[in-house]
Image: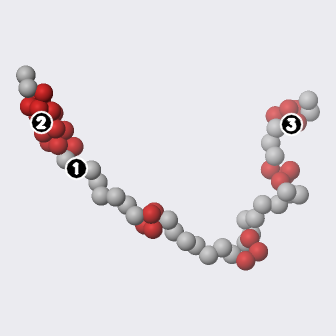
Amino acid sequence: MNRGLIGDAAEAARHARYGKLPDRIRFEDMTEEVEAEQGGGGNSYSPEGSWRYYSCLALDLGL
């Protein structure tokens, strides 16, 4: 068979099945800028208080 006819048939089959690719999304549409709260708000990380939420089975069992 002619190589060009096979390629055209395959291309036509792909186009019939998948149509076209979706439009590109601009970078500006993918990101959102949000103002940060001054002072970190109430959910800031505290290294001194992080031990309260640390969970270790060996420590819980006293090993």
How many angstroms separate mark 3 from mark 1 (CA)? 57 Å
How many angstroms separate mark 1 from mark 2 (CA)? 16 Å
Measured as percent of width and height from the top left, residue 48 is found at 89, 57
Quickly name the residue at label 1: 20
What's the residue at 58%, 73% (across, down)? 34
Quickly name the residue at label 2: 8
Kind of residue indicated by mark 3: Asp
Q: Give the mark nearest the N terminus, 1 or 2.
A: 2
Query: Does any portion of residue 45 appear in the rendered image?
Result: yes
Q: Give the mark nearest the N terminus, 3 or 1.
A: 1
Count numbered badges in the picture: 3
Kind of residue indicated by mark 1: Lys
Q: Does the residue at mark 3 contact the one at mark 1 (Cβ under 8 Å)?
A: no
Q: Nearer the viewer, mark 1 or mark 2?
A: 2
Give the left or right position of residue 2, taking residue 59 as reference. Answer: left
Helix, strand or loop at label 3? It is helix
**Quadrant occupied by the N terminus:** top left
Kind of residue indicated by mark 2: Asp
Quickly name the residue at label 3: 60
Measured as percent of width and height from the top left, residue 10 is found at 15, 33
Colouring convention used in this rendered image of the protein = secondary structure
What's the residue at 17%, 43% (across, down)? 15
Say which mark, if any, is on residue 59.
none
Helix, strand or loop at label 1? It is loop
